Image (cartoon, rainbow, N blue to C red):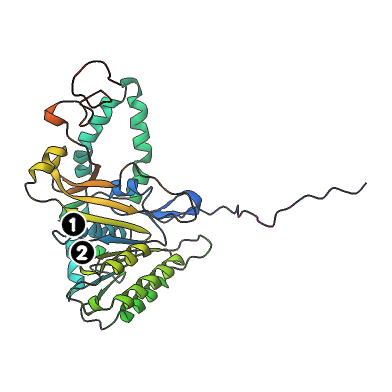
Amino acid sequence: MAATKTRISSFSRNISAVSAPQLPGIKCGPNGTFFVSSGIPDLDKILGGGFALGSLVMIMEDAEAPHHMLLLRNFMSQGLVQNQPLLYASPAKDPRGFLGTLPCPSSSKDEKSRNHDTEQEKGLRIAWQYKKYFSENIDDHKDSKQEFCNDFDLRKPLERHFYSGQRVDCVSIKDSPNPATLHDRCATFLAQFPRNDGSFSCMGRIAIQSLCAPQCELSNMDWDILSFIRSLKSMLRSANAVAIITFPPSLLSPSFCKRWQHMADVLLSVKAIPDEDKELGKLLTGYQDMVGFLNVHKIARINTQVPMILEATTFSIKLQKRRFIVLECLNQAPIDGSSGTSYGTSGGCSGSSKSGALDF
């Protein structure tokens, strides 16, 4: 009797396990994806773990207020605290002076005072007999959370020894005649972090502020800048690094603005809140504590084709105690000060405002 042959498909799944990195600030995610922190704990949760290694993050600025600087500063400080090399490009004449405005990680006393209110709220939602298990769970994961993401105090500047070394490279793009100089600096920087079979010896961060700003000569080089962004994205794919680019969309033509957005792996936008907007204050709860809005337009999906569906795409930016950045979902205020929902004051399907049985 002829021996039966085992049918083997020509497609084989790579089941080789990727070793978890030992470097602080890197977290293993699904499908072999590794994440680095954005420097804002709430933003990491919204994005499903943080910024994926090898991704290009783009933030659309608001012409009314520089709220994009809040995200950029925390991203840079998080990398410097974890001893990750940084390349910072700015339209300023002296970009190194900006490093003195970066926030400092909060102390243990600040973290306790910041988490005191949230712990009380959690205690109200959890039955008393389960409190001990909840506290143990928090204690078990406290160290790992601090290694990955810190809470930064916006009132305290970052200590000088974090950015005075040689691991910080600053570039001024104010007088650059073309993006070739910036491209070469990025290529040299990313060459230090090759991606070799999931091994992690080090990882880097790139922060480019206000690309195509009016004070730069690059503002009139639309196609050259687009080519630079495309090249930077391809270099990031083969490097253990993450890049953030902020840009003013109001200064770009609509067609080029769409092209820029299409090139981003993660696309965010910030918007300032108008002063004393009474109509908006009636619609949203906690409006007096808000400083702006954060919109999530796109999330990086690397090594997978499954989309990530968010519960919300617009979040409020709050400064808790004017020191810590907090992102929250928008909650609509109840109508006429009632405790019910903002919609559905009428229970009838016909839209009748009379209370009583449902009118079909």
Residue at 33% in and 78% down: 224
Marks 2 and 1, Cα distance to the nearest angstrom? 24 Å
- Please tell me whether residue 9 belongs to the stretch shown in magenta: yes
What residue do we see at 14% from left, 26% from top? 338
The label on residue 67 is: 1
Relative to 286, residue 150 above or below? below
Give the magenta range: 8-14
Q: Residue furthest left?
A: 276
Quadrant, the C terminus: top left
350 lies left or right of 94: right
Query: Image quadrant of residue 100?
Result: bottom left
Q: Nearer the viewer, residue 176 or 267?
A: 267
Magenta segment includes 33 = no
Q: Main secondary structure of the magenta part?
A: loop
Mark number displayed over residue 160? 2
Q: Amino acid at mark 2?
A: Arg
Q: Secondary structure at mark 1?
A: loop
